[in-house]
Image: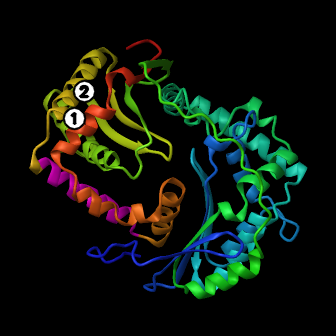
């Protein structure tokens, strides 16, 4: 369902902490009888306790493997019978579980979701089944050349902080995870005071609040939080090279940054990414693709995480053109550091505004924006993103570039054809 393009799709909304400790975020959208229920837990791969790497993702699998009330697979059948769909995702900073369905069935969907959140069974037989499933997932991931180079590259770029961890873990780390490991994770990371439920769609806040309170009960006794991991950013260049059965060379150039979420630097890097590498009119595409014919594709990304970030340039080219491509990329970066025009900046802001509107077009998009902002900064940051973006000046872009895109932190990744041709 589309929102009025002239209005902020995130407004209005409400946010409150319920007696159980759970945070409820709600927005009524009455244009169609549809509801999104979206549970967010700020526990991703970066929070996996040693040596149980891959635990957050493994836990996501077990979320769907039954409770004392509902057997394995029942949640999927219930949601499907209600006319909806459900899924989940684990990243470095979070795991979230969501359902989108006709509003008539939201209470039944909430019931099965809350039961899995509060009373997962962790059946030993299901644990072993899912362990095998994830090990096969790891093997497929390792066999994918692009997935492999991204893994190796991010491990180098984030070598001194937990963002270097693989979401899937390793075969070895998965074998350290037992039923007791899951129960410990439930009591420390899946406490209700560490969970946000985002509800967007054709249902009132009062109805949702009453239903959640009835299902969640009172708050739990306090539990000691695990010691936070160490977070540092590399200060020296890193380089990784892989050879695989690919036809072209893939070049990654990245600059790790400290945490910039919610700061002026976040908005400036988002705009620099658009100016340099988003779309056919960007500087890198015009220069390296249109004018010089050096690349088949090129793009940039400003990846902002809760505790760090990465500004990334990606290019696909012929192996014998790699040196020239890298030189031209660095030259364009140097040129943008010298300044951008007011016209370029205005165009980038227009693109950012369109991106924002498209990324919040549906109710599940809106709930995702709420949830992601809750685990990284605050929802207010997301709500006022465009307003702050408008205040960015060319001088701010230059200062951010000089402060964050530091040559001594530059990382390079190369995926090359095995024969070098």
Q: Provide residue 242's location: percent of width, then percent of height.
A: 49, 19
Q: Is residue 144 left or right of residue 116?
A: left
Which of the 4 image quarters holds residue 174? top right
Q: Quadrant of the N terminus?
A: bottom left
Query: Image point 83% across, 69% down: which residue?
Result: 70
Query: Image point 39% across, 75% down: which residue?
Result: 11
Q: Which residue is mark 1?
A: 284
**Which stretch appears magenta?**
344-361
Q: Label 2: how many residues lie within 10 Å, few (<14), some (14-19) or many (20+)?
A: many
Quick one: 31 or 372, which is closer to the camera? 372
Q: Is 345 included in the stretch rendered in magenta?
A: yes
Magenta stretch mostly in which secondary structure? helix
Q: Label 1: how many residues lie within 10 Å, few (<14), some (14-19) or many (20+)?
A: many
Would residue 248 be visible to someone looking at this image?
no
Q: Is 42 included in the stretch rendered in magenta?
A: no
Look at the picture and state if 17 lies above or below 323.
Answer: below
Q: Which residue is mark 2?
A: 329
């Amino acid at each position: 369902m589309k929102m009025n393009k002239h209005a902020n799709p995130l407004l209005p909304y409400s946010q409150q902490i319920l007696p159980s400790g759970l945070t409820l975020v709600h927005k009524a959208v009455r244009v169609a009888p549809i509801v999104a229920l979206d549970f967010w837990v700020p526990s991703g791969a970066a929070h996996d306790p040693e040596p149980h790497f891959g635990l957050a993702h493994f836990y996501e699998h077990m979320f769907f493997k039954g409770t004392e009330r509902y057997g394995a697979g029942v949640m999927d059948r219930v949601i499907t019978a209600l006319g909806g769909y459900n899924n989940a995702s684990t990243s470095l900073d979070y795991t979230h579980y969501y359902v989108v369905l006709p509003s008539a069935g939201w209470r039944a969907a909430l019931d099965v979701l809350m039961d899995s959140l509060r009373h997962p069974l962790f059946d030993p037989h299901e644990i072993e089944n899912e362990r095998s499933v994830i090990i096969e997932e790891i093997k497929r991931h390792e066999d994918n050349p692009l997935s492999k180079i991204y893994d190796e590259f991010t491990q180098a770029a984030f070598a001194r902080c937990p963002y270097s961890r693989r979401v899937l873990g390793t075969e070895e780390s998965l074998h350290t995870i037992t039923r007791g490991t899951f129960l410990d994770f439930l009591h420390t990371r899946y406490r209700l005071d560490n969970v946000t439920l985002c509800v967007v769609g054709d249902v009132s806040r009062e109805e949702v609040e009453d239903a959640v309170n009835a299902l969640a009960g009172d708050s739990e006794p306090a539990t000691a939080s695990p010691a936070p991991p160490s977070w540092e950013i590399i200060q020296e260049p890193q380089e990784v090279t892989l050879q695989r059965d690919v036809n072209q060379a893939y070049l990654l150039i990245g600059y790790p940054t400290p945490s910039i979420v919610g700061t002026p630097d976040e908005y400036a890097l988002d705009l620099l990414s658009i100016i340099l590498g988003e779309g056919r009119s960007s500087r890198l595409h015009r220069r390296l693709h249109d004018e010089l014919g050096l690349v088949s594709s090129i793009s940039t990304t400003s990846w902002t995480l809760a505790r760090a970030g990465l500004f990334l340039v990606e290019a696909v080219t012929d192996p014998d053109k790699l040196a020239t491509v890298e030189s031209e990329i660095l030259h364009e970066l140097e040129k943008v550091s010298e300044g951008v025009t007011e016209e370029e900046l205005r165009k980038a802001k227009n693109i950012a505004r369109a991106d924002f509107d498209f990324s919040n077009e549906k109710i599940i998009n809106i709930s995702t924006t709420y949830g992601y902002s809750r685990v990284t900064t605050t929802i207010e940051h997301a709500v006022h993103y465009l307003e702050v973006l408008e205040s960015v000046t060319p001088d701010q872009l230059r200062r951010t570039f000089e402060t964050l895109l530091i040559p001594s932190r530059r990382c390079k990744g190369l995926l090359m054809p095995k024969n070098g041709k």
